[in-house]
Image: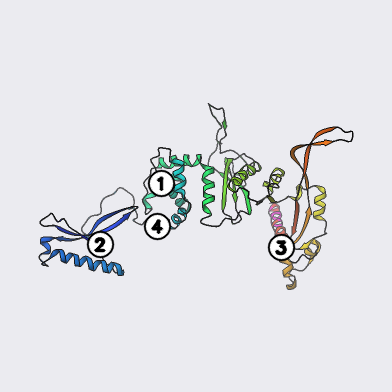
């Protein structure tokens, strides 16, 4: 704190000023009023020296961490009238400071600057992005409800609801670049492990009775399909849905995503989105992991090239007769713990209540069966026949794959109990 008074006045007023930094600017504010020169003459012969000594004492106490404040209140002052049903709280949200520190590492301000530097935009995209993110984590509400609660944050951001809608349009235009930027910058916050990638799809239903209609572009003739469409829902809701596909790394952190109409087959979404991942991870070699619904022949063929490989769930019902026979014959099974030979019949028959069989009860039996498949490479090769003629023939390759079968006594008993309860419920 420093002394301030107007030396040009005959009877100046002495103030104690404090400097504040506002971004790159420093401003001063009067925080203590010591009084006029004539008033201070009643208690001291040299008002200026007296005030300087008081400021020196205050600065010493401030440096040592001891500061005293005197608050005054007028209990006769009436509370101003308001039409609100309840008085607003004066508590401000500062819990988002932790999230704010993380978002700084993503450098989103630079991203939005690159995307808007040639456009006349009057609102701050980075600020809107920050507070939509904070609200989605701390207090998930609609965008309109989030805008109504901006005054509860410490920063008191100033933007209108229309700015949020215009920002969402901008975000939609740069959807792929935005996700790629988040992935690259997230490596500065947490180490990403992309040796294994998981992919799955989910559906979102809407409280709507009718699907969205297709829109035809009058200029180009392009048909833009409505997003909300009737499709398969695990909840069996008779509502239009939207399908979302998500890639995650081995630590469960999202990499990228896609949105499709609800009537889109999820098997058609995997390869296009994986190509977007390959743009983010040039020359990356990873393992594609998915359930049976996302492990079709085309997906497995795509992930058998370029140093990539795959692990997908396989339904036994959809196997060929030869493979089914190799699964159910009780040969070549081994324990997962020590690789010793074991039979499924032996796994089913031991007494699990014996203490010596506890490790076996928690163990797995497994068998690996080669299931290579001839695939069409999409190329042609010249083949010379026995009569000397040369003809073009489709080039064939081999899709190297193995089926890993596992058996667990514990899982068997659990599934058996589930089926028994379902049968009893059906009888009732």
User: Label 3 neighbourhood size at 10 Å, few (<14), some (14-19), many (20+)?
Assistant: some
The residue wearing badge 3 is 410
For marks 2 and 1, give the CA distance. 38 Å
Name the spot of residue 304 as percent of width and height, x first. Answer: 71, 47
Q: Are the residues flagged by discs 3 and 1 in contact, CB closer than 8 Å?
A: no
Q: Nearer the viewer, mark 4 or mark 3?
A: 4
Residue 160 appears left or right of 251: left
Which of the labelled discs sits on residue 147, or is there none? 1
Q: Which residue is mark 2?
A: 1
SS for callout 1: helix
Upstream in the sequence, badge 1 or badge 4?
A: 4
- The vertical placement of 275 against 58, above or below, is above
Q: Which secondary structure lies at badge 3?
A: helix
Q: Which region shows up in magenta?
A: 419-425
Which residue carries the number 4 mark? 94
> What is the distance, in whole Å, between disc 3 and disc 1 at their CAs?
52 Å
For image coordinates 36% across by 46% down, the residue present is: 158
Q: Going from the N terminus, do you reach mark 3 or mark 1 first?
A: 1
Q: Is residue 142 above or below residue 52?
A: above
């Amino acid at each position: 704190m420093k002394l301030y008074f107007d030396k040009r006045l005959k009877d100046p007023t002495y103030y104690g000023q404090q400097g504040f930094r506002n971004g790159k600017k420093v401003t001063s504010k009067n925080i203590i009023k010591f009084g006029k020169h004539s008033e201070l003459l009643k208690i001291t012969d040299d008002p200026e020296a007296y005030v300087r000594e008081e400021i020196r004492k205050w600065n010493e106490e401030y440096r040592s961490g001891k500061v005293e404040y005197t608050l005054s209140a007028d209990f006769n002052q009436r509370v101003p009238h308001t039409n609100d049903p309840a008085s607003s709280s004066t508590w401000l949200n500062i819990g988002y400071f932790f999230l704010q520190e993380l978002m700084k590492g993503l450098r989103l301000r630079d991203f939005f600057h690159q995307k808007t530097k040639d456009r006349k935009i009057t609102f701050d995209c980075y600020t809107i992005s920050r507070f939509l993110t904070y609200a989605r984590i701390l207090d998930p509400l609609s965008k309109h409800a989030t805008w109504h609660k901006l005054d509860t944050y410490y920063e008191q951001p100033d933007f209108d609801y229309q700015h949020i809608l215009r920002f969402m349009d901008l975000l939609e235009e740069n959807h792929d670049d935005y996700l790629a930027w988040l992935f690259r910058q997230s490596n500065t916050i947490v180490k990403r492990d992309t040796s294994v990638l998981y992919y799955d799809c989910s559906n979102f239903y809407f409280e709507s009775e009718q699907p969205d209609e297709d829109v035809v572009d009058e200029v180009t003739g392009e048909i833009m399909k409505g997003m909300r469409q009737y499709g398969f829902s695990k909840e069996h809701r008779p509502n239009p849905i939207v399908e979302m596909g998500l890639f995650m790394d081995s630590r469960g952190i999202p990499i990228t995503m896609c949105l499709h109409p609800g009537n889109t087959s999820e098997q058609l979404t995997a390869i296009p989105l994986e190509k977007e991942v390959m743009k983010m991870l040039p020359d990356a070699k990873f393992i594609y992991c998915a359930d049976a619904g996302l492990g079709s022949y085309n997906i497995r063929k795509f992930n058998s090239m370029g140093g990539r490989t795959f692990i997908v769930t396989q339904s036994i019902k959809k196997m060929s007769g030869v493979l089914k026979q190799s699964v159910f014959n009780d040969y070549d099974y081994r324990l997962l713990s020590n690789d010793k030979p074991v039979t499924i019949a032996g796994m089913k028959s031991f007494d699990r209540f014996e203490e010596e069989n506890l490790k076996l009860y928690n163990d797995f039996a497994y068998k690996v069966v080669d299931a290579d498949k001839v695939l069409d490479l999409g190329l042609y090769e010249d083949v010379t026949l026995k009569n000397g003629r040369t003809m073009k023939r489709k080039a064939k390759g081999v899709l190297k794959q193995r089926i890993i079968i596992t058996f667990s006594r514990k899982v068997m008993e659990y599934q058996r109990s589930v089926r028994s309860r379902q049968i009893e419920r059906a009888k009732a």
